[in-house]
Image: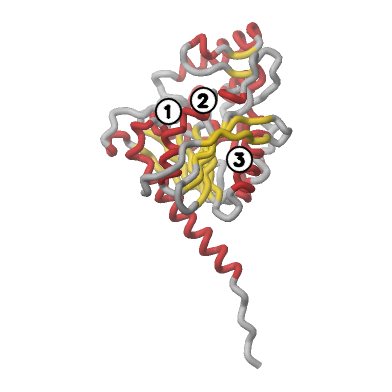
Amino acid sequence: MSSKSRPGDDVHIPARDGFELAGTVYAPSGTERGAVLISSATAVPRRFYRHFAAELARAGYTAVTYDYRGIGESRPASLRGFAARTRDWGLLDMAGAVDWASARSASVPLFMVGHSVGGQVAGLIDNAKLIAGMATVSAQSGYWAVQGAEQKWLVGFHVHVTFPLLTRLVGYMPWSWLGSAVDLPRGAALEWASWCRNPEYLRGDSTLPLQRFAEFEAPVLAYSIDDDKWGTQPAVNAMMSAYPNLERRHIEPADSGLESLGHFGYFRASGKPLWSDLVAWLDARGSVVRDQAASSQETPTAASP
């Protein structure tokens, strides 16, 4: 990998409904080999992915991070009365970010990396044909009963009691009170909790355009992590089997000299030993896309009489 990249530049990205999303672009210093849109986990601000994004830029990819509405720098001063659902992060925010990133890097393949919900709701967007491939990390079914044995009962209590009660009482989900994440808009918290009570998770919500999962034709590489108690292998399999062109890989942290990763460690600076595998997949997929484009541009030679 190249050792150089430019620092991230903050930008504004329009969602499908015109809502302005905060974003950051990490551009390579040399030739652009491709672009990668990084879609965050629930309640995780985009800045969390800065080390990973900078490494992609060093590898020759333009990396784009963005905050969903109601999260990070796309959050209003107060979440009370702010209308946003979890589905909006896919249908409006992610779809808009795909449009924007595709237009910005129109001459190179566009990929997506989805963390947790970022890989879950990607199947809902209507412009997946713009994506040359997607890699996901810990994109799991959130159904409480398929979480790790050590915490599934706690998760079950939260999605049946804590989230509905506190969200309706306060007007938004004050997740920061629990010391685990940033706060969530009311609609996003209630919808996510309802999905987590459904054995099919979001795949059981008939109000969503679920047929779009089958229309997501690009290759999908889905990672699970051995010590992720949320994204267990059964949970990841349950969610990611919705994508028709799926490849699965499982990460054992010890194989890379790492003690623990959990649900978030892959994207921390300490997760860097794992990133070369994903970059190699991007490189290989990018080569296929470029070869296909070159082949389609060749003019057939007329047959001799």
Label 3: few (<14), some (14–19) or many (≥20) C-alpha neighbours in 10 Å: many
What is the three-letter code of the residue carrying label 2?
Val
Nearer to us of marks 1 and 2 is 2
Secondary element under disc 3, as helix, strand or loop, is helix
Front position in the image: 157 or 165: 165
Q: Residue at x 60, y 67 (%)?
A: 296
Residue marked by disc 3: 123
What is the three-letter code of the residue carrying label 3?
Gly
Query: Residue 194 location in percent, x, y?
Result: 62, 21
Q: Tell me the number on the disc at residue 44.
A: 2
Query: Residue 219 location in percent, x, y?
Result: 52, 50
Task: Specify the quadrant of the image occupied by residue 73.
Answer: top right
Nearer to us of marks 1 and 3 is 1
3D distance between C-alphas at marks 1 and 2: 10 Å
Q: Residue at x 52, y 44 (%)?
A: 36
Task: Reply above or below: 113 against 160.
Answer: below
The earlier-in-sequence mark between 1 and 2 is 2
Q: Are marks 2 and 3 in contact (CB under 8 Å)?
A: no
Quick check: can you spot residue 215? no
Secondary element under disc 2, as helix, strand or loop, is loop
Query: Residue 115 location in percent, x, y?
Result: 49, 34
Task: Reply above or below: 142 against 273.
Answer: above
Residue marked by disc 1: 264
